[in-house]
Image (cartoon, rainbow, N blue to C red):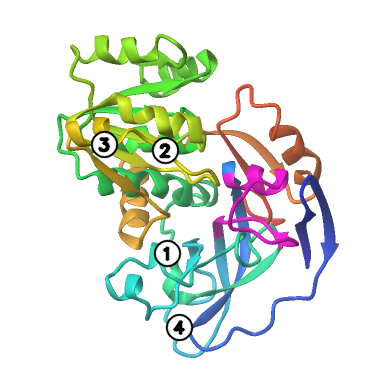
Amino acid sequence: MKAAICPAPGHLEIIDTPAAPAPPSGWARLAVSHVGICGTDYHIFEGKHPYLQYPRVMGHEISATVLEIGDGVSLTPGTRVIVNPYLSCGTCIACVKGKPNCCTAIQVLGVHTDGALCEEILVPETNLYPAGDLSPEAAATVEFLAIGAHAVRRSQAAAGSRALVIGAGPIGLGTALFSHIAGHVVTLLDASAERLEMAASRFGFSSGILAGDGALEAVHAATGGDDFDVVFDATGHGGSMEKSFSFVAHGGCLVFVSVVKDDIRFSDPEFHKREMTLVGSRNATRQDFEHVAASIRAGQVPVDKLITHRTTLDGVIGDLPRWAHEKAGLIKAVVKVGADTGR
C-alpha cells in the first residue's frame, strides 16, 4: 500500500506501508476511494494544528468501499460508505451523553491517528454510513459539510433568524449553506472580495460584507442597528473570533466553528449586556452526517460547485503544498485514491 504522509511540517512524501491487516471484531477494512482536503490538512502541513503529533498520514474527509469485515459487522463487502472520522471511546461522559464528537479520548483519523491518504484503512462499523446513491466524490464532501450542519444545529437559531457567517472558505460556505437550509437569512463576511464574489456567483449569497475598518458599521447598517441574531465564526483566526462578539445582537448567539491555538479574549460588559450565548461547535455526529447526505440527495447542496480542484494520490505531493498558498478559485480539493473509481 502507498500512503501520502507528512513526516514533518512543510514536507510531504509517498512511502510504502504494509497492507491493512484483517479487521478485528466490529471493524471493516476499506478501500479508499476519494479524500477531501480541508483547512485542517493545510494547517497540518504548515505545522499549525494544535492537536497533532508528527509523523501522520493525513486524510479525514473520506469515501470508501468495504473490502472485508470483522465479526459482528452487518455491512457487506462491496458497500460504498461515508466515513465518520471521529473515533470515540463510547464510555466517557461525552459519549454517554450522546456527544461522541467531543469524546474525552477522541481519535480523529488524520489528526490523532493515521488517516486515509492511502489505499486501505481499518474503521469501526459504527463510523461507517452507507453512501447509497451518492457519488464517491459527493460522499467525500459529507464530513466537511457536517461541520457546518452541526454548528447550525448547535446554534438552535429559529427559521427567519438573521445569520452572519464570518469566513467564506469551505467550512464557512458549508455553514452558510446549512444556515440557509435551516431558514436563516444569511450574510457572509470575509476579508477577500474574491471569496465573497464566488459565494454570490456560485451559491447565491449576494449579501456580503468585506472585513476591515468599516465592517462593524456595515453590520449595523445591514441589520438596522440590531446586529445579527446568530453569528458563526469559521475563520480559524483568533483576531476575527475576538471581533465577532461585537456583531451579535442583544439576546443573540455566537458560534465558534473553528479551533485555534490562541486564547480568546472578550469584553465581559459587552458580553453580559447582550445576554449573549457563546457556543463551541466541534466535529459532527451521525445525525449531522445523515442530514448532509439527505440534503445533497435533495439537491440543496451543489457539490459540483463546491469541488474546484482535483488530484491523485501521487499528485497531492506537489498539489497540496501549492494549494496551501495559492487560494485563488479554491474551495474544495478532492484526491482520487482508488485506481478504478469514478466521480
Q: Which of marks 2 and 1 precedes in the sequence?
A: 1
Q: Amino acid at mark 1?
A: Pro
**Could you tell which of marks 1 and 4 lies nearer the N-terminus?**
4
Instruction: State the extent of the magenta-drawn residues as a range.
Output: 40-63
The part of the image, by quadrant, that contains residue 42 is: top right
- For disc 3, the marked residue is 181
* Residue 256 image point, x, y percent: 38, 42
First-in-chain label (3 vs 2):
3
- Give the number of the disc on residue 130: 1
Q: Position of residue 312 (x, y in %)?
A: 73, 46
Q: Is residue 299 visible?
A: no
Q: Does residue 28 appear to the left or right of 73 in the view shown?
A: right
Cα–Cα gap, marks 1 and 3? 23 Å
- Of the numbered discs 3 and 4, the one sitting upstream in the chain is 4
* Circle 3 crowding by C-alpha within 10 Å: few under 14, some 14–19, many from 20: some
SS type, badge 2: loop
Label 1 – label 4 distance at C-alpha: 13 Å
Three-letter amino acid code at the position of disc 3: Ile
Cα distance in 3D space between marks 3 and 4: 34 Å
Q: Is residue 84 above or below residue 47?
A: below
Mark 4–mark 2 Cα distance, whole angstroms, equals 47 Å
Residue 73: numbered disc? 4
Q: Position of residue 300 (x, y in %)?
A: 32, 36
Circle 1 or circle 3, nearest the eye: 3
Residue 265 badge: 2
